[in-house]
Amino acid sequence: MKNNNNLNNLENSINKEKNEEILKIYKIIKPEIKKAIKGYKKAWNKSEKEIFAEIAFCILTPQSKAKNAWSAITTLVENNLLYTGSSSEIVEYLNIVRFKNNKSKYLIELRNLMTKNKKLQPKKILSEIGDTLEKRKWILKNIKGMGLKEASHVLRNLGFGENIAILDRHILRNLKELNIIDNIPKTITEKKYYEIEEKMRNYSKFCKIDMDELDLVLWYKEAGEVFK
């Protein structure tokens, strides 16, 4: 009953013009989105090192362009530094992301956290933690340099994005334009994040676009491309 009420309220308050725009974009780029989602789900079958790289990527993304963050990770891998380099060696390759000194240290701490029996085992570690929401809480508590947005980003990129939102500026701007939220908060507390995420879930049901797909549609609307 509650869900029906939420959907009815959405139907009354939604910016219908913006909603139609979202549906139109989704229809056009649906094959590209399906391909991306399929790739995310396959990511969980990758090697421990590749999964570690995906997590490391999301440590570099805060206040930096996603493409720059991934470029830095790729360069670190190519130079055999992501898995073995020191903080002082890694930082030399982080000039294209913000807060490079802190982030180089976070990468070392991540490596230590994800190492068991002298081997990187992020997949094994995450596999032992419950469902997606429990995994996210664990990431938030244990991985330095990640907030809820980054923890959600990691899980989406590893194929667990069906029920969570990556509330970056692109998504928030569109949620406001759609009248899903009243305003874009200057800072998002944990409580506020969950509140907005729930509103996005309701919109996902309303527009019949799955959460992980909706994220890519809203990102595409702002950035003009589908990217990690």
Image (cartoon, rainbow, N blue to C red):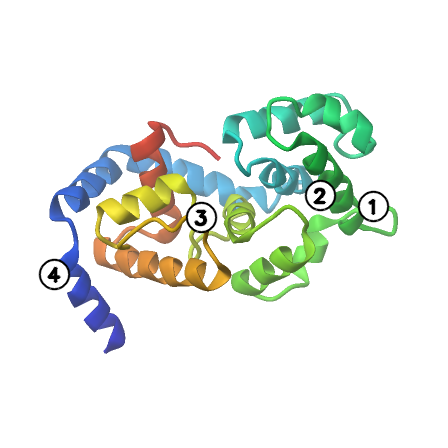
Total marks shown come to: 4
Q: Nearer the viewer, residue 117 or 95?
A: 95
| Amino acid type for the residue under numbered disc 1 | Lys
Kind of element beneath mark 1: strand
Residue under numbered circle 3: 166
Front position among marks 1 and 3: 3
| Amino acid type for the residue under numbered disc 2 | Glu
Residue that lies at the very extreme toward the bottom in this rendered image: 1
| Amino acid type for the residue under numbered disc 3 | Ile
Kind of element beneath mark 2: helix
Q: Earlier in the sequence, mark 1 or mark 3?
A: 1
Residue under numbered circle 2: 48
Tell me, yes or no, whether the two marked residues, 2 and 4, touch with CB atoms within 8 Å.
no
Residue under numbered circle 1: 119
Q: Earlier in the sequence, mark 3 or mark 4?
A: 4
Residue under numbered circle 4: 12
> In this rendering, would 78 be left or right of 172?
right
Q: What residue is rendered at 68% in x and 63% in y?
A: 128
Q: Position of residue 145 (x, y in %)?
A: 64, 46
Q: What residue is rendered at 49% in x and 39% in y?
A: 39
Q: Earlier in the sequence, mark 1 or mark 4?
A: 4
Tell me, yes or no, whether the two marked residues, 1 and 2, touch with CB atoms within 8 Å.
yes
Q: What residue is rendered at 44% in x and 58% in y?
A: 193
| Amino acid type for the residue under numbered disc 4 | Asn
Other residues around mark 4 within 10 Å, as few (<14) / some (14–19) / many (≥20) = few
Tell me, yes or no, whether the two marked residues, 3 and 4, touch with CB atoms within 8 Å.
no
Kind of element beneath mark 4: helix
Tell me, yes or no, whether the two marked residues, 1 and 3, touch with CB atoms within 8 Å.
no
Q: Earlier in the sequence, mark 2 or mark 4?
A: 4
Q: Position of residue 132 (x, y in %)?
A: 53, 60
